[in-house]
Image: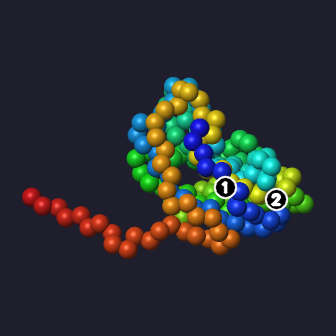
Amino acid sequence: DHTLIEGDLDIADNGTAYTRFYLFAASDFTATADDTFNIYELQQAGGTIEMSLGMRVTAATNLLEIGIGDGIAPTSFVSFPRNQQVCVELLATPSTTAAGVLTLFLDEIQVATLTSLTQAAAVGRGVLGTQDTLSTTTGALYFDQFVFDDTRIYGLPIRYPEELYMTK
């Protein structure tokens, strides 16, 4: 496990916060047994997981997916590419009195939302990095440009896009 625990990621009960980072799954990221693991958790100050972002590798097909969940295990998955940097954004609204909401955006496009989350307490810390991966899961995941804020962050604009020229 390779994790960073940050105790200053606070989201008050019924508050809203956004997380944005870039994620790159190398072509060698694979598994010989099915594996589901978290890569980002929003936890109570004491460590209980309230919301999660995780990945799943299906060994038979080598399919890589990313998903969100209520508590420990992600439940709503979409496919995730290898060898491509992807802007991952989360919108989190924990609630102890009503249903909490967690929304996943990939490259600024909404791909999954859970609207019936049950939280026991406000969020008091975040944990970023691979957690509880099987020993049969190998390869590299790269995290970059992590930002946490109470307003939508969006991806970084490409100010000078690369121009491709074809020559013969």
Q: Amino acid at mark 1?
A: Glu
Q: Is residue 90 visible?
A: yes
Q: Secondary structure at mark 2?
A: loop
Asked if residue 77 lies left or right of residue 140, the reply is right
**Res 74 label:** none
The one of 127 and 86 positioned closer to us in this rendering: 127
SS for dot 1: strand
Per the image, the residue denoted by label 1 is 6
Q: Residues within 10 Å of mark 1 (few under 14, many from 20)?
A: few
Please determine whether, in this image, residue 86 is positioned above or below residue 66.
Answer: below
Identify the image quadrant of residue 72. top right
Judge left or right: residue 16 versus residue 55. right
Q: Where residue 33 appears, x then y in whole percent?
A: 56, 25
Disc 2 marks a residue whose amino acid type is: Ala
Residue farthest along the left direction in this orientation: 168
Quadrant in the picture for the N terminus: top right
Q: Say which of 3 and 156 sits in front.
A: 3
Give the image location of residue 126, x and y in percent: 68, 54
Q: Residue at x 51, y 52 (%)?
A: 143
**Lower sequence index among marks 2 and 1:** 1
Residue to which mark 2 is pinned = 122
